[in-house]
Amino acid sequence: MSLKITNYFIFACLVAATGGSLFGYDLGVSGGVTSMDDFLKEFFPKIYRRKQAHLHETDYCKYDNQLLTLFTCSLYFAGLLSTFGASYVTRNKGRRASILVGAVSFFLGGAIIAGAVNVTMLITGRILLDAGI
């Protein structure tokens, strides 16, 4: 039995790798953003004050906040739930519809996060963004 590597197979691998890299990029960016002072001042002032009070100590337990944890873990939660939704859409409407739903979700999530003025908007946008990924 011989295995043949086709152009379609290579393209499918590239699409899968792009999805994985988007997931990793999103995780890396959110991890960096949550430690930025401007972000903490705007959305998590209690954490910012705690960080400033313990400036010369390690970062252990400075970021102990349920809302910040929700912001961070929404990546995994949205990914889990959207997997089930994507399989349903793909099975019933096709791959193109699944890609379009993901793209719209990603766009809306990015727009909401860009205009976020409170934590609720931030988390809602992140869930939509991550569901798109």
Image (tube, grey):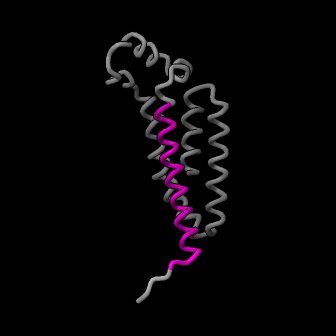
> Is residue 105 shown above or below 112?
below
Please state the horizontal and vertical placement of residue 96, each as a whole percent of the image: 66, 66
**Quadrant showing the N terminus:** bottom left
Which quadrant would residue 123 be assigned to in this image? top right
Residue shown at 32% from the left, 16% from the top: 57
Q: Is 43 part of what is drawn in magenta?
A: no
132 sits to left or right of 75: right
Which quadrant would residue 47 be assigned to in this image? top left
Please state the horizontal and vertical placement of residue 7, each as a whole percent of the image: 59, 75
Q: Which residue lies furthest to the top in this view?
A: 53
Which quadrant would residue 70 be assigned to in this image? top left
Give the tally of numbered discs: 0
In the image, the segment drawn in magenta is: 5-32
Q: Is 12 part of what is drawn in magenta?
A: yes
82 sits to left or right of 101: left
Please state the horizontal and vertical placement of residue 92, each as a whole percent of the image: 60, 70
> Is residue 72 shown above or below 45?
below
Residue shown at 48% from the left, 39% from the top: 28
> Is residue 58 shown above or below 74?
above
71 sits to left or right of 115: left
Residue shown at 50% from the left, 47% from the top: 78
Q: Which of 4 and 63 is in front in this view?
A: 4
Residue shown at 55% from the left, 63% from the top: 14
> Is residue 105 shown above or below 29?
below
Which SS type dominates the magenta stretch?
helix
